[in-house]
Structures are given as structure tokens and as C-alpha cells.
Amino acid sequence: MGTTFLIQSSDPALLEKATRLAHEQIKQYMTDDIVGIVLLGAITRGYFDHLADIDIALFKKQDSDFAIQDKFFKVDGIEVHIWLSDYESEVASAWDMPKRWTYAQGEIVFDPEGKTAVLLQEKVPLKEDEKRWLVMSGLTLSEWYINTLTQLWVERGNLISAHQMFDQGLKFFYDLLFGLNDELVADMKWRYFAIEQLKRLPSNFQARIKETMMLHSLTIEELDRRKAAFMAIWEEMKPIAEAEMQLTFDEMVQLV
């Protein structure tokens, strides 16, 4: 996925200012105690607005007593977030996918021994088995939640629960789309926005997913309308997922 996010509220002048301030702040952390520095967030994604902040990740040597006085502070009206961690601890720990997605959008700005680049190369990229799981679980579980569990809750007499199944089902469907695009699943804050940036999407995706999301009333008729809208999108992606996995839908169900 490209690192340039087209945000309507982005201000080029503010982006230039924030970038300058970020690099000014980073200079003070370029010491022997620091293994590497990564610039994250809005700046490296190519936008900045009044709601954005400067995110800087510091990886320090484990035996160092290096510390920061303030994790959050403002410089010239812009909030700065400093994320400090031990390099050795990060090497040993497992990174969840939202964290990996965040660093995939980052920029290494200080790495004198090349260790930070090695760390990110080991931790960040989507692995083949992860991709397969995203595609298989995304295809099967999105259908289960939206096509099957909705009816279960209708029969159990709870229409609110029936409609709520769409929330979980769409999360799994988004996993499918990220997997088919060989992309990490974006952090929840950015998930839908990132989905729209993907190259392999159902035709007329934005309008059709809107029909699925839209809820006019908590009725069976509305449930059927939403389900039909989603299943049309799902049916379009089913053969694509099957071809990608070299498995039928029924075979995927057995594996998930």
C-alpha cells in the first residue's frame, strides 16, 4: 500500500512545518544510547492537518538508562508523541498486526548500525500463512455472520442482535480484502479508509458497501435488504478467493 493518504483536510504548509519540527526534535535523540529512530503517522503518510500529531518511535539499548521526561508535549502548537522502547525487547516480542501496519507506513530516520531496518524487515511484512488465513477466514466467517447468524437471531427473536452481526461480518470481509491485496490489516482507526485505497476491490465498492452499512430501521425487511446487498459483493469475491487459495469455499470452511 502506498504511504500517501489523500486526506481532504490536509494542509501542505502544515505538513511542511510538522516535518521540519519532527526532524528538529529527532536530532536530540541521536545518541549512543539509541539504536534507531522511526518517524511514524501522518507525516510519513503524506498528510497533516489540525488533528494530526508528530509520532516518533525510539529504540534504545536495553542496558541504557536513557529516559524521556515527557511522552506527550507540544512544539509550536503541534502535539508530539514519543514512543520509547528497548530494542532487544522489541526483537524478542511478537508484534500484533496494527503495530506492524503502523510501522509499514513509517520512515527510518536514524539507524547507525542498520539494526532497525533488520528489525522492521523481520517484524513487519505479511507472511504467506497470514495471508492465507485472512483470505480463508475472511471469506467463510463474513458469510457465516451475515448470511447465517443473522437468521439465527431472527429465529431467536432479537432483531438488534441480528443487525449487529453485520458489524463483525464486515470486519472479516475487510480481512479478506486486505489478504487478497497482500496487505497487513490496518489499525481499526484507519481500517475502512485503508480498504478504499486497495487495488483489488469489488466493483463499485464504495456505493455497494454503503448499502450494506446503511440501517434505516431494525426490521426483518431491512435485514433482508442489507443481507442481499452484502451477499452480492461476497459472491463477486468468492471465486477470486477460491482461485487465490486453490481451494473451494467448502474446503475453506473445513479449515477455518
Image (cartoon, rainbow, N blue to C red):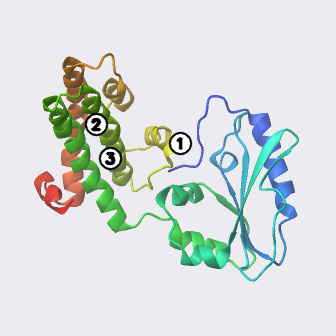
* Residue 148 in sight in this render: yes
Type of amino acid under label 3: Phe
- Say left or right for 88 vs 175: right
Q: Quadrant of residue 223?
A: top left
Query: Which of the two labelled residues, at mark 1 and mark 2, occupies the earlier sequence position?
Result: 2
Q: In which quadrant will I find the C terminus?
A: bottom left
* Location of residue 59 in the rendering, given as x and y in whole percent from the top left corner: 70, 70
x 18%, y 62%: residue: 255
Dot 2 crowding, Cα within 10 Å, few <14, some 14–19, many 20+? many
- Name the foreground residue: 89 vs 122: 89
Type of amino acid under label 2: Met
Q: Are marks 3 and 1 in contact (CB under 8 Å)?
A: no
Question: What numbered label is drawn on residue 131?
Answer: none
Total labels drawn = 3
Query: Which of the two labelled residues, at mark 2 and mark 3, occupies the earlier sequence position?
Result: 2
x 61%, y 34%: residue: 7
Residue position for label 3: 172
Type of amino acid under label 1: Lys
Residue position for label 2: 165
**Looking at the image, residue 50 lies above or below residue 244:** above
